[in-house]
Amino acid sequence: MSHIMSGFRKEKEKAAIDLLYWRDVKQTGIVFGSVLLMLFSLTQFSVVSVIAYLALAALSATISFRIYKSVLQAVQKTDEGHPFKNYLDIEISLSQEQIQKYTDCLQVYSNSIVRELRRLFLVQDLVDSLKFAVLMWLLTYVGALFNGLTLLIMAVVSMFSLPAVYDKYQAQIDQYLGLVRTNMNTIVAKIQAKIPGAKQKE
């Protein structure tokens, strides 16, 4: 089972990396544009309205194409059949193995998150819990400036732009990140030295 889960994660990670690094410009552009359009739509309309409009747009396109092909077949007296027959014949049901695979993956991530939250809230490591508290405190200010949807839009734009920028300017960025990491480690080490009971990390 662990071998299957490992292969599944590697396959998904490779697909995500290819998408975020714009390896296939057309595919990434479609995904990025669709997600961004949907998020911007949610800033103007409710979730129910956005889903309804998307469904109506899709139905309008498929019904129009279906009528067009039927008229074309009647005029040309051809018997091509249903224009979406190839798609209708595709088997889309999930097998028991696929459902089990997705369930196991969800269980692994859920357990990992619960364990990490328990460790932070029950102060297994004082410094890590303090870092988490500072992060939550900063998020209160972020939440006061931006709503969740705006942050989600910013996160999506960053996901599709920062990896490509990093790939292009990796050497320069790594240099600056190394300096920041060194300074942060120095600050954390000083804090750990002054806090009683703080656990020193290698």
Image (tube, rainbow, N blue to C red):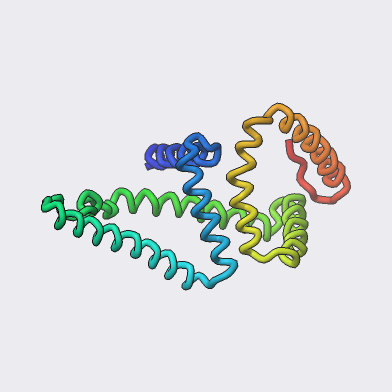
What residue is at 14 percent from the left and 51 percent from the top?
A: 76
Q: In this view, does 71 lie to the left or right of 147?
A: left
Q: Residue 137: which quarter of the image?
A: bottom right
Q: Residue 170: which quarter of the image?
A: top right
In this orientation, which residue lies closer to the viewer: 15 or 63?
63
Quadrant location of the C terminus in the rendered image: top right
The answer to whether residue 107 is above or below residue 5 is: below
The answer to whether residue 177 is above or below residue 74 is: above
Q: Where is residue 118 in the image (x, y as percent from the top left)?
A: 62, 58
Q: Residue furthest top?
A: 171
Q: In this view, does 82 lie to the left or right of 63?
A: left
In this orientation, which residue lies closer to the viewer: 94 or 66?
66
What residue is at 59 percent from the left and 67 percent from the top?
A: 43
Q: Residue 163: which quarter of the image?
A: top right
**Total numbered circles:** 0
Q: Is residue 20 left or right of residue 15?
A: right
What residue is at 25 percent from the left and 51 percent from the top?
A: 87
Q: Where is residue 200 in the image (x, y as percent from the top left)?
A: 77, 41
Quadrant location of the N terminus in the rendered image: top left
The answer to whether residue 130 is above or below residue 26 is: below
Q: Is residue 41 left or right of residue 137?
A: left
Q: Position of residue 186 (x, y in %)?
A: 84, 38
In this orientation, which residue lies closer to the viewer: 77 or 176?
77
